[in-house]
Image (cartoon, rainbow, N blue to C red):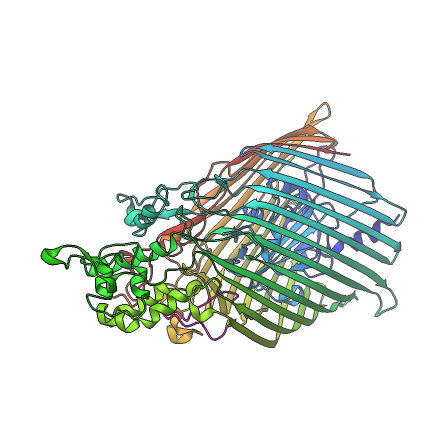
Amino acid sequence: MRLTQVLRCTASVAVVGAVAFGFAGVASAQDGQQSTVDDIIVTAQKREQNLQDVPIVVTSLSQETLSDAGVKDIKDLQILTPGMTVTSTSSEASTTARIRGVGTVGDNPGLESSVGVVIDGVYRSRNSVGFGDLGELSRIEVLKGPQGTLFGKNTSAGVINILTEAPSFTPGYNAEFTAGNYGALGVSGSVTGPISDTLAFRLYGARRVRDGFYTVDTGDGPRPETDDQNQDFGSVRGQLLWLPNDSTSFRFIADYTSRDEYCCTGVQIRSSSTQPAIDTLSNGNGARPPVATAPNGGLLPFSRMAYANRSSGQEIEDKGVSLEANFDLPSLFGGATLTSVTSYRDWSTDLGQDIDYTGADIAYRVQDGQNGYGVENLTQEFRLAGATDKLDWLVGVFATKETINRRDSWYFGSDYTPFISLLLTANLNRASPSIPVSGGAVGCFTRTGQTGTSAGLLGCLASGGTGILPVGPGGANVTVPTAVGSGPGFTLGQGYADTYDQESTSIALFTNNTFHVTDAFDLTVGLRYTMDDKSLDARQQNVNGNGATCTAAQLNAGAIAQGLGAANVGGILGALCLPFANSAFNNRTINESTDDSELSGTIKASYRLNDSVLGYVSYARGYKSFGYNLDRVHRTGTITPVTTLYFPSEYVDSYEAGVKMTLVERTLLLNATYFDQTFENFQLNTFNGVGFTVEPIPELTSRGVDADMVWFTPVEGLSFQGGVTYTDAQYGVFTAADLVDPNNFPAASLLPGSRPSFAPEWSASLSVNFDRSLGNGLRAGFSLAGKYMTEYNTGSDLLPFKLQDAFSTVNGRISIGSEDDRWTLEVWAQNLTDEEYLQVGYNGPLQGTAFQSTVQTTGTNPGTFYNGNLDTQTYDAFLGAPRTFGATLRIQY
């Protein structure tokens, strides 16, 4: 009796209409008739519209399509979405989505996303909140290109709009049981129904466990786990839908998810000159040995053997509530609807980490509450929308208050001091063979009042720090007291405990209006004015005497110059005063605040040639907020902390021209769009082997074509859905003078004029779904979903060893069940062909050097600071998931 109101209430959180595949609803075949593309309603412009009337690139994925492809979270989603990649790195808390080759690395909580995630109308400020069990999905809409007018800042590359199932007034329940390889077990279920004539509920819960994908060599220990990247989480979501009268509705949602896992180690894809030092210190190899006969100086074969002597535990907690209220106001402006969306979210993580990703006990973080971060967010949005014959109008206001708290700690292992010593003396030995490679030389550089003479620093280095030299009668070995390396080494145990507290407030006014100029021609104009205010209070604090090694070495800078030459001073002090060991960070307080306001918007013109064909052009201006790099950062090439952690806002200007077609008696849907996007001050976050640096790149362009199709074939129950994205993405040509910090240019010197990371030239997806009756009350079917991407680099700095070759992944399942869907049994496989690919390649911490200190005139990349012939860097990678398979039983009533 309240069907109309139920549909209106859930329009912003669920699809209105029957949606069975891809972009369109399916009118199920009846009496042997062929299925057709039916009209569906989407909310890409925060109002109910037919998908084929919306002048935006939208990949719309229904509940059945998502289920058939095995989609549980946004990382699974990418197999159905051409032009989209989703990766995670050192933990599942570091998840990044990219669209059309554009996104923001998620390891640093100070950076917000370029691709926004919205769940049931609530904006989530970090992509990592979408990596987990999303529950019962009604549909997912992937909106490509800037969406800031209606979805707000930090959607400069697109939006993943996730819509879950709402409560129903029809009683029902379902359950799902899954078992698979790697010890995977999962159970989930929900129940829904009326509490009264005006109040309905839905309750969902899930628990999933799985063993890890990696085998771990624990080296020196004490790590107890011998596998990694397991799964162990639970989720619960409760909802109430209240319809007090025919013009008012309320939807209340409360959810909680907890993960208690260990993740993520990396594997060496190329071990370099530092591996012998690690081997010397570790119980066992400590890292993959170099393969001398492999190409590129030792590129290792793909392996899931990881090395980590410390635990990589991760605890993630995500909880929140939201309330969406809708009020019909028939007397206001000829009829309007007021929508209010209120939310509170609290997301936090506590992490452990083997920082060096080796079996040697070099550096680590402990899962003790001092390493991780939390995001607490309160949002309020009001929208007033209405329509006349000539105008669809919408005005609104959005406000959010967000608190980020990061805790960062660093522990020095027992092998850190000898490891640094081995690296330093190995480098000196190449120039002066009289200096042996030794693990005891750090004290030579830090001994009080050291001199550069043979009885001082040079003698100490020649003795390996023991002071034993052949200077006695007849060349006998004697101990020279002034040549003993008695200076301080690095702190054993915790070295620092930093805290970062960032407060941000954002208020936006927006409007989006479509003028029906004629019956065929529409003009849409949208504007958004955003006011941002952010402040940072941080304290960087060394503990347990950390920094004494750095200070002592600095006092001996003259002796180092005298004994080894002035040119070596910077490199030696740099190795002894890395950010986590630098005394300049002790008791350092940071207080920064910035406010800014920006006007963004869009204009779209669409023309309907006939009932089957719509053409459109559009322009959009997007905005991604400024922020602070919540990390210890040196000025590149120095041991001096940066004066500010601030980085500026990012902007995008986007042009699109597209066509949407519904053809062949509504059995074929075909959409294609040309896009041209130019990003200014693109916020590039890069791990350089010792920390994260943020450098705005002056220009990044992304041009290409998005095409999507859905085809319901004449064969009963058989349909295809697919898409292809061609992307020509490129950094603009820039020099050091064009950067905020010119010292960052050497590590960015491969970027000018190059294709950015995670931007394959071609990306294509295709799914085939077949389902039909077998008679005797049974149905059977199968589905295959595959994605192909051409090669792309997985590192922000574009170092060649991080390149991922072209590859394909395929998911598939076979099902049988009752025609009334009371039960269904599925046999499934993800990554059916067991494709081996990199998620993200990264520099092995403290393990070599990729970029040189001067421009290279010869070698592999002349004109840059990179020469592959001189590259001593060890490269690690976080790998894509292997083949998984299993069976799922579903029951519903």
Q: Is residue 864 or residue 762 the one in the foreground?
A: 864
The magenta stretch is: 627-644
Look at the magenta stretch and give its main secondary structure. Answer: loop
Residue farthest to the top?
776
**Picture layout, residue 599 above or below residue 766:** below
**Picture layout, residue 739 above or below residue 862:** below
Number of dots carrying numbers: 0
681 is within the stretch colored magenta = no
Q: Is residue 860 visible?
A: no
Q: Is residue 408 or residue 252 the one in the foreground?
A: 408
Q: Is residue 772 or residue 328 the one in the foreground?
A: 328
**Picture layout, residue 135 above or below residue 378:** above
x and y, in percent, of residue 415 in the image: 38, 52
Tell whether 626 sits left or right of 854: right
**Picture layout, residue 352 above or below residue 649:** above
- The C terminus, quarter of image: top right
x and y, in percent, of residue 695 in the image: 46, 68
Which quarter of the picture shows residue 730?
Answer: bottom left
Residue farthest to the left?
474
Q: Is residue 387 or residue 232 the one in the foreground?
A: 232
* Residue at the (63%, 73%) spot, across then down: 532
* Residue at the (29%, 63%) spot, across then down: 444
Tell whether 252 sits left or right of 156: right
Tell whether 835 sits left or right of 637: right
x and y, in percent, of residue 735 in the image: 37, 72
Which quarter of the picture shows residue 489?
Answer: bottom left
x and y, in percent, of residue 45 in the image: 68, 61
